Amino acid sequence: MDEYQRIASKKERLILGIMSGTSLDGIDLALVRLAGTGLEMQIELVKFVTEAMPDKWRARIRNAFDTHTGEICTINFDLGYFLSDKILHFCREADLPLENLDAIGCHGQTLYHVNNHSTLQTGEADVIAYQTRTLVISDFRTADIAAGGSGAPLVPYLDQILFRNRTGPIALQNIGGIGNVTYLPADPERNIIAFDTGPGNAILNELVENITNSEHSFDRDGFLSVQGQCNPFILSRLLKHPYFSIEPPKSTGREAFGAGYIKQLLSEISGEPVSQIDLLRTLVSLVTHSIADAYHRNFPLPDSIFLSGGGAHHPIILKELRELLGEERVSVFQSENGISADAKEAVAFAVLAHERINNTPSNLPSVTGAKKRVTLGKISIPYLD
């Protein structure tokens, strides 16, 4: 506890945020210098990298949805060692002695998420704390769920800090494995709206692997989907998925829009005259139309819509969102306060770790539906000789 008190007493901290998203395409690591708390927090991104997710790990996490309890238990600790290795490598490359790193904010890997009920994050934090000899804050969703919330999304806490000086309403649309939006009204006194819009890259990646017999893991630059045509009848049917009609707060994940979704969809259309390439193109439109429909249902169209995540680099997704929401409104997020779109989520977990050490509540009840503000994250204190 002496080590924790030493770090808690510091006015400025150097924290490493690390996360792996539902798209399973990479591991993001962001070294962040932080001072202050809440909307007055000062955030400086020192270094950011994305490490490719090894095929072995991608397969293990995907298979975890249908595996036995023993494998899930093993994944939790094995992933802790794997992430520790990534952190140690990052620090060596950054020429950063571990004793200069104050804490690690680790989101880990979501294996399953039940909206408003429970969540399962893996990547054992005590393993990471022991291997890196560094304080680790992890498991950020559970306290919000315990307080009656959905436990997600979490990045809006950072969004409100980065865009505290906005002059009009904006929407920040991330398209990772799952799509999620943060709507920031022009008046900072009004409640933020944020929720998962629905499917993102996860279903596209699953179908691409199926089409190419695992030769490709995603639809890079739309190289496959551009060859197909959207089937409007199938699209209309898919847009009737019950998730889209649920009122926010809400969240979802690969348990709803992942491998199982694609397996069931392929079974349903097996007798229909539609190719898998056409189906892939149709799923691209499902992503864009579900986003646009979510906006029209839940808030007025903002002045600016900034896209981030892997889906922001998909040319058809970008083109369709501009057609659906307005050419002048939609653009790809570049950077804010020196923080790029690719780095934003990893930075968010450094910020949440910083606030946990500050003992500052960092959930947003207007976003998650929680009954009260709570601090997020569990603390793993390293054993130091």
Image (cartoon, rainbow, N blue to C red):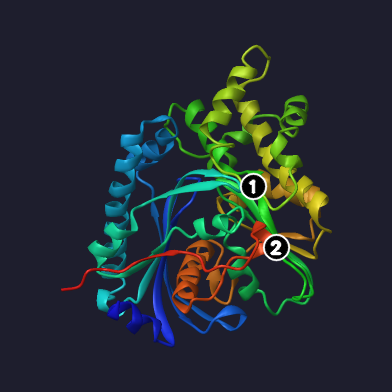
User: Mark 1 — residue?
Assistant: 315
Q: Residue at x 76, y 41 (%)?
A: 245
Residue 353 at x, y = what percent? 45, 70
Q: Residues within 10 Å of mark 1 (few under 14, many from 20)?
A: some
The image quarter containing residue 340 is bottom right
Q: Nearer the viewer, residue 268 or 320?
A: 268
Residue 4 at x, y = what percent? 33, 77
Q: Is residue 261 left or right of residue 183?
A: left
Which image quarter is the C terminus in? Answer: bottom left
User: Mark 2 — residue?
Assistant: 366
The image quarter containing residue 192 is bottom right
Residue farthest top in this picture: 271
Residue 350 at x, y = what percent? 46, 69
Q: Is residue 161 left or right of residue 192?
A: left
What amino acid type is highlighted by mark number 2?
A: Ser
| Number of callouts | 2
Which disc number belongs to residue 208? none
Q: Nearer the viewer, residue 353 or 114?
A: 114
